[in-house]
Image: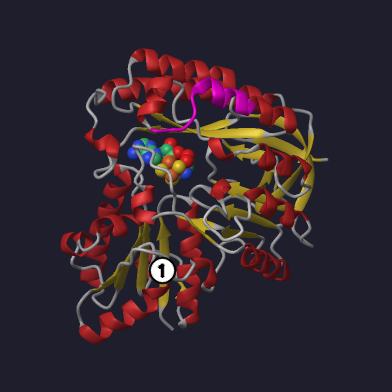
Amino acid sequence: MPTYFVRTFGCQMNEHDSERIAGLLEAEGYTKADDADAADLVVLNTCAIRENADNRLYGTLGQLKHAKQRRPEMRIAVGGCLVQKDKGLIIERAPWVDAAFGTFAVGELPALLERRERTGVPAFEFREQTEVFPSALPARRTDPFHAWVAVSVGCDNACTFCIVPSVRGPQVSRRMGEILDEVGALMDEGVVEVTLLGQNVNTYGRDLDGRPLFAELLRALDGVDGLRRVRFTSPHPHDFTPDVIDAMASSSVVCEHIHFPMQSGSDRVLRRMRRSYRIERYLAWLEQIRDAIPAVAVSTDIIVGFPGETEEDFAGTLAAVERARFDSAYTFRYSVRPGTEAAGMDGGVDPAMVAERFDRLVAAQERISLERNQAAIGERVEILIEEPASRKDRRRATGRTRTNKIVHVPGAGRVAGEFVDVVVTGAHPHHLDALPA
Ligand code: SAM
Ligand code: SF4
């Protein structure tokens, strides 16, 4: 039987799509290989969000070229956002690629591979809109206890730095009944946690007849038998309506964690980014969320070095970080994405200055993350075991709290997918230590 290996770059939507790619290939009779070197077919699911994602892809393709020289029968397929962005360019730059498929053509992979064999030349397929929701395709999930469930694809916003709307298209939501049917079927397979996915997940339903709302979806999931945890990503701060907050607060399954991407603490920069809020508004929303859900943990995204960012703007970001006291933050150096509005803006920030600001931001956030984690010492919490024992330390298992914090516990006897009550004994910026309660 032929073997495959899928390598995923980028966000959770790509992880979701990769599980579908694996599912499709297994339905065609492929089995999973342990690594790319041994596989008959290597699939790269790419990301275009920042420039280093481009560089990493072309670096990986360079390595695969050598592997293919040694094993000419090996096949290489490339899919995802970078393919959607670069279209035929990928085959021009890497003619040893056998198949390329855009974000709307995940389901085409088996047909493309077949066409490649029949014609002897690379096959590719790009579409400009979703015809088959990838969730409708078979999945081979990485963790049997967890499932990604796409509720929408695409994004109707136009943040000036972001390439997502141009590679994932406008928002298209799935019907609520279809989502609930999928979740029901997942329960029968033993899944206990689902993560709802959408590029702008909390505007779910806006494009559907009857305009079902994200809050309604959260409420409907509360009644699903067997479902223990619901997460969602990635939301836009603007769309955390009181109704969504209320649905979260009253639900027993929606986890006490929100991702609340701030991007910048300077109103001038937020305006140039075309983010719809200003920083005081953002911080006020955060306060409302914390009032309604006292146990909530908050993570964020912040971009440093957006065109025109001054030292004063950056000081605004640092001040906002101090006031917001996020549990964690994904921090990014601004990366020019050709075709986006910000790519045409002047005021590029000197890379050395960006690096220096970035380090200051990370240091501030690490201190705050540590302080927030230290506050959890002594608390009794439920964790879901994700890794029975890590590769680094065979005696240590890793789980996650409802608040999305990584927890290390003694590993003996722990099984992935099991819930354990623990008492937090130690804190670090990015994880907690705990002992069984
Ligand atoms: N939809 C989400 C939102 O509205 O916040 C974000 C999706 S994007 C995949 C994830 C994060 O990548 C963004 O929140 C932003 O911080 C970062 N990002 C996007 N474009 C970027 C760029 N050109 N340079 C640096 N970071 C970027
Ligand atoms: Fe990109 Fe998110 Fe803005 Fe949409 S809302 S354009 S995905 S950053």
Judged left or right of residue 404, residue 156 is: left
Q: Position of residue 19 (x, y in %)?
A: 50, 65
Q: Is residue 154 visible?
A: yes
Q: Position of residue 254 (x, y in %)?
A: 71, 47
Q: Amino acid at mark 1?
A: Val
Q: Residue furthest left?
A: 92
Q: What is the quadrant of the C terminus in the image? A: top right
**Left or right: where does residue 298 sit relative to residue 31?**
right
Q: Is residue 293 left or right of residue 350?
A: right
Dividing the picture into quadrants, the one containing residue 119 is bottom left
Type of secondary structure dominating the magenta stretch? helix
Q: Which residue is mark 1?
A: 106
Viewer-closest of 319 and 422: 319
| Residue 282 covered by magenta stretch | yes
Q: Residue at x 33, y 42 (%)?
A: 50
Against 372, residue 174 (above or below) is below
- Residue at image location 33% in from the left, 26% down from the top: 305
